Amino acid sequence: MRPGWYILCCSLWILIGIRAQAQDSIPDRQIKVSGYIKDLQSLLFDKDLRHVVASDLLHNRVNIKWKPAPALSGALEIRNRVIWGEQLAATSGFADQVTNSGAWVDLSKTWVNRSDLILVSNIERFWIEWHDQRWNFRAGRQRINWGITTMWNPNDIFNTYNFLDFDYEERPGSDAVKGSYHFNAVSGLEFALAGHGAGQGSTGAMRFFTNKWNYDFQFISGWYGKGFTAGGGWAGSIKDAGFKGEFMYFAPRKDSAGQLNLAMEWDYVFKKGWYLNIGGLLNTNGPDRPVSGWATLDFNLSPKNILPVRWAAVLTSGKELTPLFSANISVVYSPGVNLLILLPGVKYNLATNLDADIIWQSFFAKIDGAFGSIAHNGFLRLRWSF
Amino acid sequence: MKRMFIWLFLSLPGLLSAQNATEIVRKADEKMRGETSHAEMLIRTVRPYWTREMEVKTWMKGTSYAMILIKSPARDKGTSFLKKKKEVWNWLPALERTIKLPPSMMSQSWMGTDFTNDDLVKESSAVEDYQHTIIGDTVIDSRACYVIQFIPKPEATVVWGKLIVCIDKKDFIELHTRFYDEEGALLNTMKAYDVRLMDGRTIPTRLEMIPADKKGQKTEIIYRSIYFNRPIDDHFFSVEQMKQQN
């Protein structure tokens, strides 16, 4: 484990903790604990819906927020997961897949790793922050979220998330230092530096953000891995429809060509509460022809590989049928690869803090000249928040 | 000249009444709004077979700035909304990100309640966006009230076609409001109860929004506390502050 700032950050946490406990006058609410327990039942079907692999995930997240002084705060968030079922036996190296890659420091612990059960804990956030009216500094494991659009985020160069991993609501964090300075209520500069672990280099970037003509704008410049990157994004409206976009350019290097990622979307809410979002993605390095096998599509997503296709379009529609019951569907289509993903889901609030979700994922693609179904996944999730 | 004088003379009572009506609306509006306000409230959504409660904190400055922070239940805690002039942002603490909402969201239900986003952040101005006429008198909870009709001005972007508002003659409290659509159909009724002294003002502390066509359905807002005219800097209404409120 590397020493450096990370240990410093941890030590500061402990020091503040000792100080906080030593002072009787500090009210209890300076430490806030929240989180949830979720149970996720998965059914992974083959293309013909004949064969199914079942598994279950018990998922607990504990978030501890600390505010020892108005200008100072810290967070420790831990995610514990117990996974069992047929999927474990059917997938080799499953335990490696459920831990986050790209972290500078390994803060995960696999307590049990058997062919029928895995118990893994991971520290998801662990940071300390100081701020005043204009400055803000945060160090430790944190999420640096520069994304603007809802589906694909080319500007999210620090911690890309997989849009199919709907159960990972908080998304992965980065081991990073981040600082920002606000010129006024809407404009400022932010810089961040994140390490990615042995041989994976680092990401460092500066972001200027402002608001003009009822639009949010941002411009980003820095490096990703070992190459230069620059981009920007916007969020505004055309009449009553929201209009957002992000673009990111990665300069060519000896071992990789230059690349542009561009995402745009429009969203609108109709009179009876129907929500509609239409978006598109361009990834200039993605394949634009049907592939020879499903495995050739690289779903190990990263800032350079937001979706492993050249072009993709998405249509999301949702409606709150009652304040407790809502339904939505996303349809993703890539014209070149001929990839189609259907993502319908329903959500029901059973009690104040108890939610139930049914989620479906269907994949279709043109493989070896024929368009057909690839796989289908069904999920039932119960979530209790505290 | 003579004709003009007669016209003025004849139309004077009408002009005076319109001015009076607007003045009454202005007083009632200022009573609940103030230059700034900071409130803690309970929002209860009632349906025939279930009830849900939510605790929120709100900060408002004029008609341009508003911030709403959800304190409970746990599943929504920390979610906040920021409105600056025509723009609205939503902060999702689990994702640690802001999402800018499309303008078409303003006329939609807020968090499943019978209030719209517009009702909560009061984008439209009761005083500036409507023409007001006194159309009668009534008595509500032993309080004598003016009955005032609100018709949106042609240039105003408001979601209603007409409002009928009952305002207490003594304390200028808006006690009863009916919201009509552009075709003249009644959509919602808002009733105000539990008039009490809060921060030196006599105001209703419980509001009920009742949709016209849905039996057994309503949303209640109960003020736990409200403070008026405490200075709030414009800079407070920023995305950065929205994050810091958690």
Image: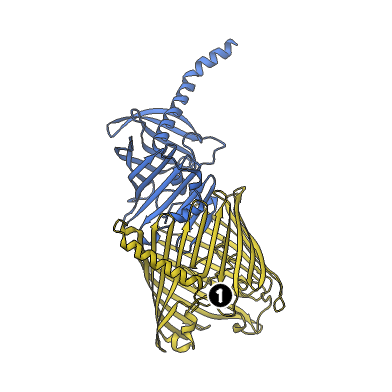
Chain colours: A yellow, B blue
Where residue A13 sits, quadrant-wise, is bottom left
Q: Residue at x 53, y 68 (%)?
A: A176
Q: Position of residue B165 (x, y in %)?
A: 40, 35
The single residue placed furthest to the top in the displayed view is: B2
The single residue placed furthest to the left in the displayed view is: B142
Left or right placement of residue A334 versus residue A169 in this view: right
Residue at the disc numbered 1 = A196
From the image, which quarter does the N terminus of chain B lie in? Answer: top right
Q: Disc 1 sits on a residue from what chain?
A: A
The answer to whether B155 is drawn above or below residue A276 in the figure is above
Q: Amino acid at mark 1?
A: His
From the image, which quarter does the C terminus of chain B lie in? Answer: bottom left
Secondary structure beneath dot 1 equals loop
Q: Position of residue A188 (x, y in %)?
A: 58, 54
Q: Position of residue A121 (x, y in %)?
A: 41, 77
- The answer to whether one can see residue B137 in this image is yes
Left or right placement of residue A13 versus residue A97 in this view: left
The answer to whether B124 is drawn above or below residue A220 in the figure is above
The answer to whether B104 is drawn above or below residue A245 in the figure is above
- The answer to whether one can see residue A350 in this image is no
Q: Position of residue B67 (x, y in %)?
A: 45, 49
Q: Residue at x 41, y 68 (%)?
A: A76
The answer to whether A148 is drawn above or below residue B163 in the figure is below
Left or right placement of residue B180 versus residue A235 in this view: left
**In-front residue for pair A105/B145:** A105
